[in-house]
Image: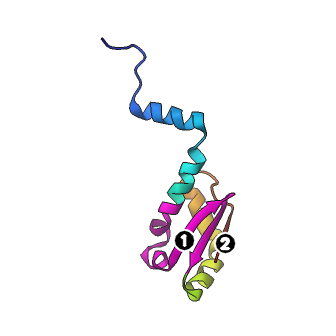
Amino acid sequence: MRRSNTQSLSEVLKEYIAQNRIESKLKEVDVVQGWENLLGKTIAHYTKNIYISNRILYVEISSSVVKNELFMMRDEICRRINENAGQNVVSKIIFK
């Protein structure tokens, strides 16, 4: 017997995400995982640790030269991250 209130799996997952208010955390995970795609393999090679806390992206860089270059581009990087995420996920970037 078929039920009349069937939903697709994607609809159920979207509803679950909305009800539990975890969309912003999922976007943060996407940002961290997409770091290499956004900045390239060369920059990702010098990156040790990336995490987001209170809309601040913390990035640990092993090269002082790369850190300086990224520091100069941080506003552009922040804009590109938010553009790729589709919402304002990161308001500030701190390079360590």
Q: Earlier in the sequence, mark 2 or mark 1?
A: 1
- The percent position of residue 23, horizontal first and vertical second, equals 57, 44
How far apart are the two marked residues, 2 and 1, measured between alpha carbons? 12 Å
- The percent position of residue 28, horizontal first and vertical second, equals 57, 55
Badge 1 crowding class, 10 Å Cα cut-off, few under 14, some 14 to 19, many 20 or more, is few
Question: On the rendered structure, is 42 left or right of 95?
Answer: left
Q: 46 or 71, which is in the foreground? A: 46
Amino acid on which the number 1 mark rests in the picture: Asn
**Residue at which label 2 appears:** 94
Can residue 86 be seen here? The reply is no
Q: Residue at x 30, y 11 (%)?
A: 1
**Residue at which label 1 appears:** 49
Q: Residue at x 45, y 73 (%)?
A: 40
Q: Is residue 56 above or below residue 6?
A: below
Give yes or no for contact between labels 2 and 1 (Cβ–Cβ under 8 Å): no
Splitting the image into 4 quarters, where does residue 63 fall?
bottom right
Q: Residue at x 49, y 77 (%)?
A: 43
Can residue 70 be seen here? The reply is yes
Q: Is residue 82 magenta?
A: no
Badge 2 crowding class, 10 Å Cα cut-off, few under 14, some 14 to 19, many 20 or more, is few
